[in-house]
Amino acid sequence: MTSTNLSRPICILGLGLIGGSLLRDLAAQGVHVYGYNRSGSGARAASAAGFDASDDLALTLQRAEQDRAIIVVATPMPAIPGLLDAIMEHAPSCGITDVVSVKAAVYDLVKERGLEDRYVGGHPMAGTADSGWDASREGLFTRAAWVITYDHAPDASPEWIALWTEVARMILGVGADAIPARVGRHDAAVARVSHLVHVFAETLAIVGDNGGALAQSLAAGSFRDSTRVAGTQPSLVQAMCETNADAVVAALDEALELLHDARDSLAKDRPDLTALAETGYAARVRFEARHGARGESVSPVKISSRPLLRLHPGTPGWVRQLEQAESLGGRIDIF
Amino acid sequence: MTSTNLSRPICILGLGLIGGSLLRDLAAQGVHVYGYNRSGSGARAASAAGFDASDDLALTLQRAEQDRAIIVVATPMPAIPGLLDAIMEHAPSCGITDVVSVKAAVYDLVKERGLEDRYVGGHPMAGTADSGWDASREGLFTRAAWVITYDHAPDASPEWIALWTEVARMILGVGADAIPARVGRHDAAVARVSHLVHVFAETLAIVGDNGGALAQSLAAGSFRDSTRVAGTQPSLVQAMCETNADAVVAALDEALELLHDARDSLAKDRPDLTALAETGYAARVRFEARHGARGESVSPVKISSRPLLRLHPGTPGWVRQLEQAESLGGRIDIF
């Protein structure tokens, strides 16, 4: 793991699963880190566990401004506009990052406020089944993908490049794989591999339930696994899919075409599912090969199977290096 | 576990995952059991492990005929017609059951040969990821659903009722939950909770793969779980879905209607996924409640969460009891 070597404190807004786990990891490495949580009980629980946490937003942001902290907005999408406004009021010179699972919708809010040169988007892919401070834990991000956006890089000031570098160091510091992606590319990718998975899981759960007691009784491991994320709170699923609707519709249209083809092949006099079964199998085998090192390693040290690109932010050609990493789904290291 | 108390030997045709595991479980309980495997290497491996196995089909069936054994056809669908013909030639008075994952297509083959009064259909829901003798193991069926068909019950002879009773005892003897279902009801149910899951998994795997390296890199646990069964050999997926095409098309049409509604709701000016997210969540919660005892128990003794009906085969009203168990997805015990 790259050791965390940050030149600024970190101020986390929202101490739930992601924000709380980030607070724990950074504190464990001796980083100067503190947080705010809207619910007093969450803030008190974090304080009682020995962390520096408050439920006073204005005070926390004023402190961040004095410290020149980087602010991590670690709340769901609906809270983002209000928090950006509060940051503009109380911490007008702090750099900002976030952890929301869609990036274009957040970037629109950032651009509306003219904050592009103070903002770097982030998205750690680290689970949503449980939530709240009580679900947070050290080590949550180990070898998880953590997207870092870079749309502003071609127009960036030295300050933005410094901010971007600090955010990347923070991601690497908690053991995640920092994966550069522009907001549009990120949203299209997660629509395919995450949001569509939720839409399918909800659908399967309903069709299975419609089969009544016999169908439910016969449902085994494959049904359980494929509908697991339908157990996510509906409001969270809605927040993800509705704020990324264009990309989800595009992925869904692609899926619908495959499903209609399969349906027509099965409705023939001689039903034939060869095309879907063989293409799907080949796709899954490629996925397994790509993720093999992560899934199968028995070593306690998790090894990333993602290609690594080392770069020096701000040097000539670094934007092209970011684009290359993006196209490979690669992780970066900073030197 | 109900102790296995069989009055006839068991002859298993096909010693793969299911047939091999059945051979192991029955032998461990002192049941008189032997098997045939088409590949000599599989038969030799079973023999070397101390079991009574042969690769000579005619001899094995002649022995079954002499023993008045019950024959368990434990091969995939494509081998069924040939094996039924061989049984008619070499074991013309033996009772027959099978383990194929579709039941109407098998029952058609049985009816074509006039074997209804000698046949009881079966389907253990016990996994398909691995196959062959090497994948077989003791205890595979513990608390698994094992469907037992009863379409012939209203017209049954005393011999058929005796056969049905023996097959039920065999199922209970290996620790499975014996769940009565007519072939059409079974096929409709597994189309929803198993075959549709495969179609969805293949589709998700393809759409994810089409997203290229970035999408694959960002794919996390939910994508992995939801596409797991796309790793099944395509020929097995085809055999399941193509031989149950009518029921799969019906389930798929239901799913397509939900997906098109979701697509249209997401394509609106104000995207809205409330209906699918809330209905899917409620369905999944019901599934979890129903399966709770099975999934969460930490006891080494697995407890079934399925309702239990005790019945005495052949007594007045027993067909109505079977229908009641079927409608509840319930398991039966024999007294």
Image (tube, coloured by chain):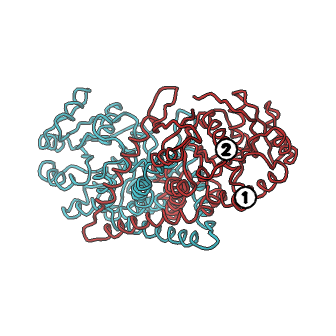
Chain colours: A cyan, B red
Q: Callout 1 environment at 10 Å: few (<14), some (14 to 19), or many (20+)?
A: few
Q: Residue at x 21, y 35 (%)?
A: A42
Q: Quadrant of residue B162?
A: top right
In the displayed structure, would residue B54 be above or below residue A199?
above
Judge from the rendering whether residue B243 lies leftward or rightward of residue A218; answer left or right. right
Instruction: Say which residue label 2 marks.
Output: B158
The numbered mark 1 sits on a residue in which chain?
A: B
Residue B69 or residue A236, whichever sits in front: B69
Q: What type is the residue that disc 2 sits on?
A: Pro
In primary-sequence order, the first of circles 2 and 1 is 1
**Is B333 situated above or below B213?**
above
Q: Residues within 10 Å of mark 2 (few under 14, many from 20)?
A: few
Is residue B44 at least partly visible in the picture? no
- Image depth: mark 2 or mark 1 in front: 2
Which part of the image, by quadrant, shows the C terminus of chain B? top right
* Tag 1: amino acid: Gly
> Which secondary structure, mark 2?
helix
Tell me residue A104's x, y (percent). Answer: 31, 62
Camera-nearest residue between B201 and B150: B150
The residue identified by callout 1 is B114
Of B101 and A72, nearer the camera is B101
Label at residue B94:
none
Q: CA distance from mark 2 to mark 1?
A: 17 Å
The picture places residue A175, in percent across and down from the top left corner, at 43, 40
State the count of labels: 2
State which chain disc 2 sits on. B
Could you confirm whether marks 2 and 1 are on the same chain?
Answer: yes
Label 1, secondary structure: give it: loop
Residue A19 is situated, as x and y percent measured from the top left of the image, at 29, 41
Residue at left offset 76%, top offset 54%: B84
- The correct choice, above or below, for A282 with respect to A333 in the image is below
